[in-house]
Amino acid sequence: MARQIYRRSSTGRWVVGILLVALVVAIGVIVFVMGPGQQGAGADKPPQESEPVNDVNSSEVAEVQFKEFVPKSPSGVEIESEPKLPELPSAAPEQASSQAENLIEQAMQSLEGTTPDVVKARDLLNETLFLPLTGQQRETVKQKMSELSDKWLFSKTVYSGDSLCENYTVRPGDTLVQIGDEHKVPSQILMRINNIVDSRGLRAGESIKVINGPFHCRISRSQFTLDLYLQKTYVKTFPVGLGKPGHQTPTGLWVVEPGGKLVKPTWTDPSTGRTYRASDLDYPLGSRWIGLVGVSGNAENRTGFAIHGTKDPNEIGAAVSRGCIRMYNGDAILVYKLLEPGHSQVRVIE
C-alpha cells in the first residue's frame, strides 16, 4: 500500500512540474511576440483612445513628429489627395463686382415671401464667395450662410432640390456606420440631425435624413479661422489657435488620418516628459483628437499634427501651439462629428 501511495504521489509531482514548465514557456513566447514596444505609449507614439466614441470634444498634440508618409491606413482606407476645394480670390477689391452684387440680391429675394427658397439662396451666396468681394461683404455672406446652415444642414428637414442632403430609407441589416460610410460622413452627425439617441434602434423601412459628404476645412493662418465646407459649399466659420513662431502650422493640404480620430487620448508632453491621462485634473487636451497627415505643399509627408480642443479659451485666436489647430471644445466636438477619415481635407493657407 505504501508503495502505491508513493507511486501516485510521484506521478502527481511529475504532472505538476510539466504544467509549470509549459506555463513558463507560454509566458516567454507572449513577451517575445509582443515585445517591449507594447508595454506603454512613448512620446513618439500616437495618442490612444481611452473611452467610447460617442459625443465630441478635443485638444492638442505637442511635439511635431516627422514620420514617413503612408498613403493607406492599416485598415486599408485610401487617402484622397486630389484637392477638393476651389481657390479663393487672392485679394479683396475696394468694391465688389457687379456679378457678385447681383447674386447677393437674388439670394436675398429668394428668402422673401411665405415660402423662402433656402437651397437657392444658399447656392447663390456660395457662388459669390468665389468671386471678388470686399472684406465686409464676404463676412456678411458668410454670416448669412451660417444662419441658413441651421435650416438645411443641422436640422431634420430635407429641402426640395437639395443635392447635399436627402431622405434615405433604411434597408434590412443597415447600420448608421454603414450608411455614413456610403455617404462619406461620420455616423455621429447622422445621429444628431435625426435625433437618434441609440443607433441600435434603427429600423428597416424608416426614413432618415442623410448628408452627402465629405466635409472639408480651410484654415487661415492670418485670420486664425477655420472655414467648414460640405463638399464645395460653405457652412460656417470657427475661431482657432495655431502654431507659435518656430512651430508654425504648415501651410498646404492635409487629410484627416484614417484611424486618427480619438477620444480623450493619453498624451506625453515632449518638453517635460510627463504623460497626461483623461482622468488627470490638469489634462491639457479636450475630449477629441482629429489626427492629420500632410499631402502637399509645406505639409507634404508630415504627421503628428491634429485639430483638437483646449483647456484654456485664451489660446483661441493666438499663435501658441506647437503647430496643432486648437478649437473651443464645443467647436471641436462638432467638427469631430463632421470630418471623415481618408476623405475630409484640411487646407491651411496664409
Image: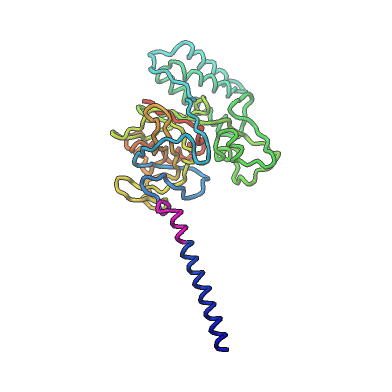
Does the magenta portion include 38? yes
Number of numbered tags placed on the structure image:
0
User: By what rule are the colours in the image chosen?
Assistant: rainbow
Measured along the vertical axis of the image, is residue 8 above or below residue 249?
below
Question: Toward which corner of the image does residue 223 lie, by quadrant?
Answer: top left
- The image shows residue 183 at horizontal and vertical percentages of 59, 33
* In this picture, residue 24 sits left or right of residue 179: left
Foreground pick, 255 / 185: 255
Q: Residue at coordinates 49% horizontally, 61% vertically from top-left? A: 26
Foreground pick, 228 / 1: 1
* In this picture, residue 111 sits left or right of residue 345: right
Foreground pick, 40 / 292: 40
Question: Toward which corner of the image does residue 44 lie, by quadrant?
Answer: top left
- The image shows residue 250 at horizontal and vertical percentages of 36, 31
- The image shows residue 101 at horizontal and vertical percentages of 48, 14
Outermost residue on the bottom side: it is 1
Does the magenta portion include 63? no
- The image shows residue 244 at horizontal and vertical percentages of 31, 35
Measured along the vertical axis of the image, is residue 113 above or below residue 344?
above
Q: Quadrant location of the C terminus?
A: top left
Question: Toward which corner of the image does residue 168 lie, by quadrant?
Answer: top right
Q: Residue at coordinates 55% horizontally, 35% vertically from top-left? A: 185
Q: Quadrant location of the N terminus?
A: bottom right
User: What are the residue bounds of the magenta stretch?
Assistant: 27-39
Foreground pick, 4 / 336: 4
Q: Residue at coordinates 38% horizontally, 41% vertically from top-left? A: 60
Magenta residues: mostly which secondary structure? Answer: helix
